[in-house]
Image (tube, helix red, strand yellow):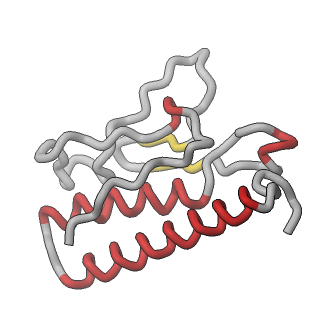
């Protein structure tokens, strides 16, 4: 199964989305995740998903976006990160378990996208309203 790319949250700043390593550059003996390290200068704001060689930190959205603005990543961004990671692992070490995990993570991401579309249609997305 080939996972088609899923866009990162449209609410996340472009500079906050992790950048995947090019195919073939990921060495699991040297890096825990198949992403470039987050390149951040001391005076820049912290990205919503910060990646290093051996760790990842997710800074989650706090409060409704319409009240507080975008100040962190969404749950669907975390799922996308895991999808990309497992997809890279599965290219090197394919197995049915990885395929099943990818299918179910993709389903979870799609259900959250459907929820978001429903909330946008009802004009309650980004609020604490049901």
Q: Position of residue 74 (x, y in %)?
A: 62, 54
In this view, the residue farthest toward the top is 43
Q: Quadrant of the N terminus?
A: bottom left
Q: Residue at x 49, y 24 (%)?
A: 40
- 46 w.r.t. 96: above or below: above
- 104 w.r.t. 119: above or below: below
Of residues 19 and 29, the one drawn nearer to the viewer in this rendering:
19
The quarter holding residue 125 reads bottom right
Q: Quadrant of the C terminus?
A: bottom right
Q: Position of residue 55 (x, y in %)?
A: 43, 49
Q: Residue at x 15, y 46 (%)?
A: 23
- 9 w.r.t. 85: above or below: above
Q: Residue at x 58, y 40 (%)?
A: 12
Of residues 19 and 108, the one drawn nearer to the viewer in this rendering:
108
Q: Residue at x 32, y 44 (%)?
A: 35
Report whether 103 appears left or right of 43. left
Report whether 29 appears left or right of 60. left
In this view, the residue farthest toward the front is 121
Report whether 111 appears left or right of 32. right
Q: Position of residue 109 (x, y in %)?
A: 50, 67
């Amino acid at each position: 199964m080939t996972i088609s790319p899923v866009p990162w949250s449209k609410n996340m700043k472009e500079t906050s989305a992790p950048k995947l390593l090019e195919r073939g550059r990921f060495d699991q003996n040297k890096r825990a995740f198949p992403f470039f390290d987050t390149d951040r200068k001391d005076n820049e704001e912290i990205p919503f998903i910060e990646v290093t060689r051996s760790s990842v930190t997710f800074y989650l959205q706090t409060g409704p976006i319409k009240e507080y603005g975008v100040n962190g990543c969404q749950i669907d961004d975390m799922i996308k990160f895991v999808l990309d990671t497992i997809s890279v692992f599965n290219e090197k070490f394919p197995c049915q378990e990885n395929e099943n995990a990818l299918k179910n993570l993709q389903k979870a991401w799609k259900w959250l996208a459907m929820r978001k579309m429903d909330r946008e249609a009802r004009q309650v997305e980004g609020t604490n309203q049901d």
